[in-house]
Amino acid sequence: MHVLVTADAVGGVWTYARELVTGLSRKGVKVTLVSFGDIPTVPQMEWLEGLRGVEFHPTAFKLEWMHDAENDIEASSEYLRRVIDEVQPDLLHLNQFCYGALKVEIPKLVVAHSDVVSWWVNVKGSEPPADRWTNWYRDVVAQGLSEASRVVAPSRWMMECVETFYGKPTQSSVIYNGRTPTLFNPYVTKENSVLSVGRLWDGGKQAALLTQVETEVPVFIAGTEQHADESFRSAESGLGASHPQLFLKGQQSEAQLRQLFGRASMYVATSRYEPFGLAPVEAALSRCALICNDIPTFRELWGDAAVYFKKNDAESLQSVIEQLQTDREMRLTLSNLAYNRARQRFTAERMVDDYLELYQVLVSTGAAAA
């Protein structure tokens, strides 16, 4: 089988694509990978070295959620059509909505990782204003979803958002994302400390909630402080350490993150908007106790393998941290529950197997229709 996978190099979709493409290659699937948004850095591309049957086409075309992207989306769609004509894949695995509308005679799987409208509703409390760009974006997303052979979301909650804001897809599935457990170390001696990972500029990640919490243990926040879309950067306010135990680590390398995950005994998932959340999975695979904002996604994914603080409430978060920092037995119990749940449900191998099963259905259905 030959699958063309699209990705972007400016967010978590790149990590997702890494796990997917690596797993597909190891199972003998030929992959053509096309990336958008920005040219990946050399460290970002290291994982591609040595993979069999993988051909990579990096581009810097703007992504559909970036302002003034209309011309780039038209140009990148034409570019993608040329690549498809050249390599002749059996199936398209599209990690952007817009390419679901490509006029091709092969199955198109579109993955709904996140979208502007559901982000806006959950972060700002209402749908975005109906200006020219927003109307264009909503039309592009709706068309891509309606013309896809199958729409996949990484959680039931995200699929509900798709149905609410863009209409119910003809065919849909939920496939949870996954990470490779061996990339993380669950056996490091833990420090009594708290870690959170997320884009500091993103109100959906709500990292600022931890600046309102005073603890006796160190609290580390890791994540980029700069928006990927230049048009938003002037609006950034940044975060300042509000107490001596809060440390902003900025953008971290994979090795640095692995060390932070390994040392932290507690991980706080502060997101108020989260279609899935790879960082909590990485924390769980590092045997951190999970403290999660009480939103539907985290309840769906983690159930009783995490402890929850009152939605968006800094006082409640502080209370939960204080409880866990003094109760070692509870921390250990939660860390083992999270670790076991991640190993059972959120591994890359399980994710790749689920996608392969779906690929087979789509390809065989497409062949029968032809």
Image (spheres, rainbow, N blue to C red):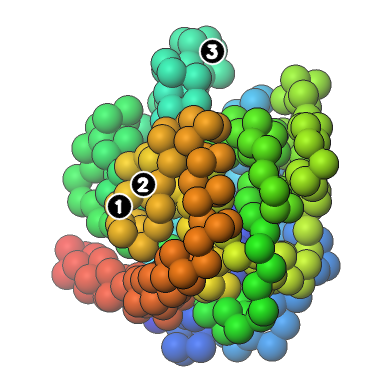
Mark 2 vs mark 3, foreground winner is 2
Q: Nearer the viewer, residue 47 or 104?
A: 47
Q: Which corner quadrant holds the C terminus?
A: bottom left
The answer to whether the residues at label 2 and label 1 have Cβ atoms under 8 Å apart is yes
Instruction: Name the residue rendered at 57%, 73% in the picture.
Output: 286
Q: Earlier in the sequence, mark 3 or mark 1?
A: 3
Q: Is residue 18 left or right of residue 23?
A: right
Residue 200 % position (x, y) = 70, 38
Q: As shown in the figure, which amino acid type bears the numbered disc 2?
A: Thr
Locate residue 61: give its quadrant: top right
Q: Residue 368: which numbered mark, if any?
A: none
The CA distance from mark 2 to mark 3 is 31 Å
Q: Is residue 283 left or right of residue 44?
A: left
Q: Residue tagged by mark 1? A: 300
The CA distance from mark 2 to mark 1 is 5 Å
Q: Which corner quadrant holds the N terminus?
A: bottom left
Q: Residues within 10 Å of mark 2 (few under 14, many from 20)?
A: many
Q: Residue tagged by mark 3? A: 132
Q: As shown in the figure, which amino acid type bears the numbered disc 3?
A: Arg
Q: Residues within 10 Å of mark 1 (few under 14, many from 20)?
A: few
Q: Earlier in the sequence, mark 2 or mark 3?
A: 3
Q: Residue 297: which numbered mark, if any?
A: 2
- Residue 42 can be seen, yes or no: yes
Mark 3 vs mark 1, foreground winner is 1
Residue 312 % position (x, y) = 48, 31
